[in-house]
Image: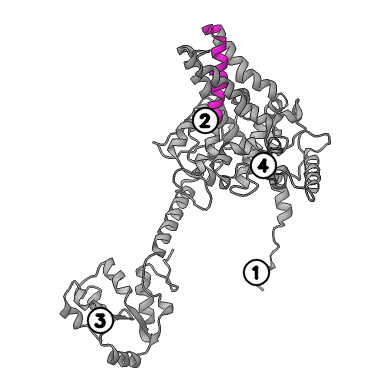
Amino acid sequence: MSAAAKMEQVDLVQANKLAAGADKKSVRVVNGLGSLMGSKKMVNVDFDEDSNMDYLLRRDQEEKDRYKSARHISEMPWTVHNWHRHLNWLNMVLVVGIPLVGWYYALSGKVPLHRNVAIFSLLYYVIGGVSITAGYHRLWAHRAYSARWPLRLFFAVFGAASVEGSAKWWGHSHRIHHRYTDTVRDPYDARRGLWYSHMGWMLLQPNPKYRARADIADLTDDWIVRFQHRHYILIMLFSAFILPAAVCSYFFNDLKGGLIYAGIIRVFAIQQATFCINSLAHYLGSQPFDDRRTPRDNWITALATFGEGYHNFHHEFPTDYRNAIKWYQYDPTKIFIYMSSMVGLAFNLKKFSQNAIQQGLVQQQQKKIDRQRSHLNWGTPLTQLPVWDKQEFMDQIKKNPGLVVISGIVHDVAGYITEHPGGETLLQAALGKDATKAFNGGVYLHSNAAHNVLATMRVAVVKEGYDAATKFAARRGESLDGKKLV
């Protein structure tokens, strides 16, 4: 029995409980308006027990038992009679209904856009966007750095202005996404299509069968996260709509413009930009670090999302406070976090080592090379060639005089004699002989191309020269099984 077989194995059930935070007594955090959060179906945070997790797990089991004998609406086909049951109506109002009202007033000309309002709307868009990327995402969801309470409070207030849920809900959903990327438990599973990963996952009723959880004890330990979650609806209404309307009314005498442009349309724009991370960043771009999953690096998405478009890097190194690691890549969120650290508002900025990052790049490059390599003829691997002793080699020459030995490998060059760049007579002089020294510099120091062409002519290995053959193949990048050496 191997040593590995004797060692105690990790208990997967217990490990998954730890990953879900099921072993902890969570801080009680109740949203004041309960189910109106719009996230109750997937991440229920309203509870009436000492332990939030105990309550949640019990509710999970109850729902699981409920649908053992009955299908959930998400598993039923759409019909004229049940289509309304497929939709998450709160999110339909927040993500579709309200923006349509805003665009109606904007495009109809009923509320014209003035320059000062446009400038303020853009500025407020940046404030709300950075609060999501630097706050909700890199600070709370990934703990890529630490922040003092004034900065966290800033993120809580203006992150709510983007109308993307509380930091607690957002962080939990995002951790589930990273834990279950490209699986049925991924809230915005990219494999279900571009539309689903962009908006469909919010607008449709989720299947409770695929409910998932992640440990967010660190989030509920943060009093600012708790405060924002308890009062999310009020904070959201104030920061997303009332505050921008009031600012534009006071400074520019344009209450309606502030509400429509700095409020509704700005919220629509930042939501759509954020949704692009779930959709476009899993479809467009390159995969320089790993291609086993869908995340991709895409500078276009980065432009729309304050640097969050380098998603392949992010999924490989999620606790790195950066998304872009090269000087020319657009990542203003990284700069904001760094500048915050310069004035003492942020600290403990985390970065993966350059060695680990470079390893990922090299490994992915090797995978691409190996895929290209697999489509080429590199010659028969040594282990698949017959082994001839000297006598058998002599016997084979009588049947085929076009054999040449180079570094212990027998090659049939009969069909190549007229193609040989060094001339026919030179190759004919080597027939039936060991031409190792001549091939390796005695006459010509042959190129890589010559080695590759020669490998396609292998027919056997000389018994006495097997060691020389393996060394010769190794110099070309082969191992005993014919694959490229690592």
Which is closer to the viewer, label 4 or label 1? 4
State the extent of the magenta-drawn residues as a range.
250-272
Q: Using the rendered view, name the quadrant where residue 186 is placed.
A: top right
Element type at mark 2: helix
Q: Which of marks 1 and 2 is nearer the N terminus?
A: 1
343 lies above or below 379:
above
404 lies above or below 87:
below
Judged from this view, the residue extending furthest toward the right is 49
Between the residue at mark 2 and the residue at mark 3, the CA separation in whole angstroms equals 68 Å
Q: Give, as a three-letter code, the residue at label 4.
A: Trp
Read off the residue under disc 1: 3
Queried whether the magenta region covers residue 252, the answer comes back as yes
Question: Between residues 349 and 410, which one lies in front from this camera angle?
Answer: 410
The residue that appears at 54% across and 17% down in the rendered structure is 105
Give me the disc on residue 414: 3
| Residue 97 coordinates in the image, percent (x, y) | 62, 25
How many marks overall?
A: 4
The answer, for residue 299, to whether it is visible in the render is: yes
Task: Name the main secondary structure of what is drawn in magenta.
Answer: helix
Between the residue at mark 1 and the residue at mark 2, the CA separation in whole angstroms equals 47 Å
